[in-house]
Image (tube, rainbow, N blue to C red):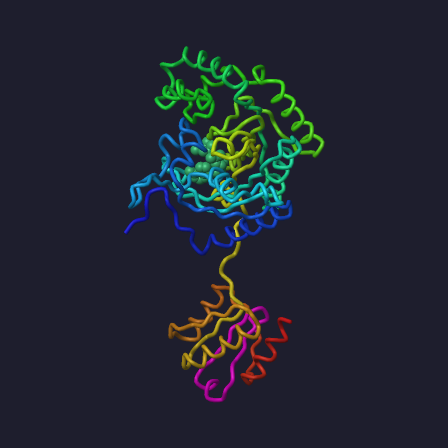
Amino acid sequence: MEILRGFKDILPDEIPKWRRLEETARRTLESFGFKEIRTPILEKTSIFARGVGEATDIVEKEMYTFLDKSNESVTLRPEGTAGVVRAYIDNHLENYPFRKFYYIGPMFRYERPQKGRLRQFHQIGIEIFGIDNPAVDAEVVLVNKTLLDNLGITDLRIEINNIGCPNCRPKYLEKLREYFEQHKESLCDDCKRRLTRNPLRILDCKNKTCQTIAKNAPKITQFVCESCKTHYEQVKDYLTKLNIEFEENPHLVRGLDYYTKFVFETITDKLGAQGTVLAGGRYDNLVEQLGGKPTSGIGFAAGCERLVELMETEETLNIDYYIANLSEDLYAINIAKELIEKTKRSVYVEYEKRSLKAMMKKANKISARFVVIVGENERKNNKVILRDMETSSQEELNLDNFITNEVKRWQ
Ligand code: ATP
Ligand code: MG
């Protein structure tokens, strides 16, 4: 039996990091007033086709789409924003007092699996609706920075760009198309297709030749309209005043169509080619595009696998009490039951009948804080031997006294 290509088990050794990531994210985002939202993993295909954009890599070739038993086309969510926007419209969340939401969960994209690129991966994302104030763009970058700081991830850089809006972008796209048309023969097959469908995406191609050609492509800067420009300049001014370092990258575009004005990425050099850990931006037309009232929006999504990769490893093997069960199982389970109930600590009962020596070896391996030795003698006399693994001291106690002492210990 083999796991699907591009899918991954998250094993117990990695769980503490995942938990710390999720707990830190919840704490950080909630401290900025974000409220969690959980939307379905499966949605109607049209949500993503319209939300993410027909001419994106995601919709063109990366979606897990299939017909359900009533012949409806459904899709495993490839990203979180479209679903949250759908939920915002469906549930009239414009009436909810909070405008800031976050989600954590799995996403699915049929991509070529490689380091840092999976077919099932996880994202932590935020969305803010109905505020077009550039201060919010700056807050989103601040949230991003605070989250990564709280996770202890360093050596990151923030790149930003202005990608304009439906008023000014078409003129730029025309210029881009003209430019890439001259290099058409050297572009990869995907980019040849992007040339007519979505030339902006060529700037984001991972192919080396396309990247070289893209280096000299016209920049959007001189094409953006007054309103996009003012907005972007304001964001930069706020970021500077908040002491958030950033670099401008006029070729930064995002893989999804819905972005407008301000976009950004947080990048590390430690993960090789898959160096973007978090990406986001403004999407002022998405809510309307999905059938809602015109409502501005902004958010980001962070890739959990890439964040976990950058986090310090944590010790996973540890337990408060290891019960060296050398007698009857029931006596051992009863001790565990009392300990768990009264001390709320963790207890591991040994059921593999081995020598005390073998059990002590295991107790060391799993970093047991205490070992409770229960042999035939102890059971008969209603006693235990408690061994403190830190001091290597050991004493025999009545079961009742033992439990009372242990309750006191952790108070
Ligand atoms: P890329 O250009 O690397 O394909 P993208 O533009 O598709 O990225 P987004 O859709 O903006 O990425 O996703 C935000 C973040 O989610 C990425 O920066 C990355 O950390 C993570 N991510 C995206 N796709 C994958 C994947 N297939 N496997 C693991 N993480 C991913
Ligand atoms: Mg992608």
Q: In the figure, is residue 163 to the left or right of 353?
A: right
Q: Nearer the viewer, residue 260 or 29?
A: 260
Is residue 359 depicted above or below 152 in this figure? below
63 in the magenta segment: no
In the rendered image, the residue lying farthest to the right is 241
Q: Residue at x 58, y 41 (%)?
A: 94
Q: x and y percent of residue 76 in the render?
A: 38, 42
Q: x and y percent of residue 30 in the render?
A: 61, 48
To which quarter of the image does residue 266 belong? Answer: top right
Q: Nearer the viewer, residue 68 or 203?
A: 68
Q: Which portion, as a residue range, is magenta?
A: 370-392
The answer to whether any part of residue 274 appears in the image is: no
391 in the magenta segment: yes
Q: x and y percent of residue 383 in the render?
A: 51, 85
Q: In the figure, is residue 410 to the left or right of 215?
A: right
Q: Quadrant of the C terminus?
A: bottom right
The answer to whether any part of residue 182 appears in the image is: yes
To which quarter of the image does residue 182 belong? Answer: top left
Is residue 336 depicted above or below 303 in this figure? below
Q: Residue at x 54, y 77 (%)?
A: 386
Q: Residue at x 40, y 44 (%)?
A: 42
State the count of labels: 0
Is residue 261 depicted above or below 119 in this figure? above
